[in-house]
Every structure is written in C-alpha cells, then in structure tokens.
Image (spheres, helix red, strand yellow):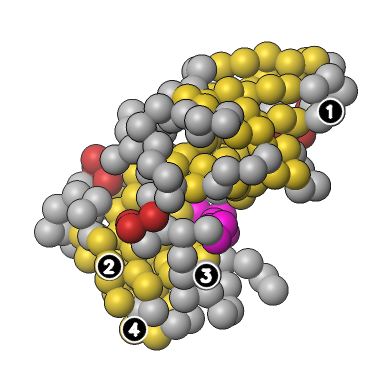
C-alpha cells in the first residue's frame, strides 16, 4: 500500500484566497483524522471521521475551516478565506476504527499564507 | 483530556539503550498508552502501544508500571536515525481513538 497520500505537499497562497487540502487514506481504514502543526501550538487534532461521518470537530478553529469525507477513499480540508495565521503543516492520518489501533500519518501539506 | 508529562529533552549515545519516561497519573482503567515519534520534517510515526502488560515490537519495548500511572519507552540500541520527538499519548476509551499530542521529548543521539 502507498500509505496515506496528501496533496499538495506545499501550498503558498495570498490572504483571502480559498485553500483546499486533500487526503487519501489507506485502503480499508475507516477512521480519518486531520491535524495541524505549528511551532507555537504543536500538533492539534482538528477533526476526525469514522465511516465517513464527522465524529468530533471540536478542534476546528473557526467557521473558516470545513472538512468533508464524501467517500471512504477521499477527504478534504478547506479554509475560506485563508489568513496568515493559518500557515502550518497539515497532516492527515488514517486508522482502523477503535481505541487500540495505530494511526498512519501522511507526509503533510505545508501551507503558507502571505 | 487525560494528560501525560514527559521531559522536554533527552540525550543518548549511539548504540546505547534509551529509556524515555512518561507520567500519566490520571489514566483510567480503559485508556491505552500510545507512543509515537516524529522525525524531522516528517509526519508522526507509530511506535508502540499497550494497556496493562509490557509490550515488545521490532522498534521498541514499552514497560508499564503496575499502577499504570507511568510508563517507559525503551529503545534497546539507539541509532542516529532514532533522533526524533517522542510523544506519549493516552488514547481515551470513549473518545473513538483520537490522539491528543503533548509537547513530547526531543531525543538527540550522539555518535
């Protein structure tokens, strides 16, 4: 398996623009997680899905952020409008559903908002 | 959220064992102890997890105290490639498998 796939790997955009980050989980995994990492705040869980259904979005910073999972093999994280403080590395991870299973992380998308 | 406490940094010499401690005094009986590591410029990587008994895998060993209020990740022979930030995380039984990362321990390995 290719592992968790994220695209793009790097994104540079101007403040106010819409940004869409994409994630393809490992085939057969039914849980998907979006994280954000910054130097100041470390790794933060934004939202996670079980069987394509959002379970906990309490980490989503504000209404400018939205995430979808239309099917088991694809998820998006959208920021509209983007702001400089959204600059971070965004990771997607997938796992089998349940407490005892490990999460597999993608390589991340480095977002820079100028 | 259940909290873990780890030293900010540790140093090790290459080819020597490394013991990375973690305190989790508020752990409940159904919480799993997970360890992940993050190498520079990469996403986090699963290392090991356990519930009550000590665990071994090809990467490391996990020693869990009898009262489960602390645990230790053991790297049996550190290599330069083990230099990373190591995170000790409690996976809460009724929270669907989500991980709450703390600051972790930055491990440096000297040749």
Q: Nearer the viewer, mark 4 or mark 3?
A: 3
Q: Which mark is residue A96?
A: 3
Counting from the top left corner in percent of width and height, residue B59 is at: 76, 43
Counting from the top left corner in percent of width and height, residue A103 is at: 53, 58
Q: Which mark is residue A70?
A: 4
A108 inside magenta stretch: yes
Q: Are marks 1 and 4 on the same chain?
A: no
Q: Which range of residues does the magenta coloring cover?
A: A101-110
Tell me the quarter of the image containing the N terminus of chain B. Answer: top left
Q: Which residue is mark 1?
A: B77
Q: Are marks 4 and 2 on the same chain?
A: yes
Real-space CA distance between mark 3 and mark 2, rounded to the nearest whole angstrom: 15 Å
Mark 4 in CB contact with mark 2 (< 8 angstroms): no
- Image position of B12 (left or right of B111): left
For residue B19, above or below residue B50:
above
Q: Which residue is mark 2?
A: A55
Tell me the quarter of the image containing the C terminus of chain B. Answer: top right
Q: Nearer the viewer, mark 1 or mark 4?
A: 1
For residue B103, above or below residue A29:
above
Q: Are marks 3 and 2 on the same chain?
A: yes
Real-space CA distance between mark 4 and mark 2, rounded to the nearest whole angstrom: 14 Å
């Amino acid at each position: 398996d290719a592992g968790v796939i994220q695209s793009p790997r790097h994104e540079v955009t101007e403040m106010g623009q819409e940004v869409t980050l994409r994630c393809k989980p490992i085939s057969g995994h039914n849980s998907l997680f979006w994280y954000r990492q910054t130097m100041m705040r470390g790794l933060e869980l934004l939202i996670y899905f079980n069987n394509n259904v959002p379970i906990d979005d309490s980490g989503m910073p504000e209404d400018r952020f939205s995430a979808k999972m239309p099917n088991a093999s694809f998820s998006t994280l959208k920021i509209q409008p983007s702001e400089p403080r959204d600059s971070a590395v965004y990771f997607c991870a997938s796992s089998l559903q349940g407490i005892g299973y490990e999460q597999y992380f993608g390589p991340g998308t480095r977002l820079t908002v100028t | 959220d259940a909290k873990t406490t780890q030293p900010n940094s540790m140093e090790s010499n290459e080819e020597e064992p490394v013991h990375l401690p973690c305190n989790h005094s508020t752990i409940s009986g159904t919480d799993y102890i997970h360890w992940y590591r993050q190498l520079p410029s990469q996403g986090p990587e699963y290392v090991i997890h356990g519930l009550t008994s000590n665990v071994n895998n090809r990467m490391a060993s996990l020693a869990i105290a009898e009262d489960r209020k602390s645990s230790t990740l053991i790297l049996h022979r550190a290599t330069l490639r083990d230099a990373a930030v190591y995170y000790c995380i409690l996976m809460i039984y009724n929270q669907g498998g989500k991980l709450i990362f703390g600051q972790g321990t930055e491990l440096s390995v000297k040749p």
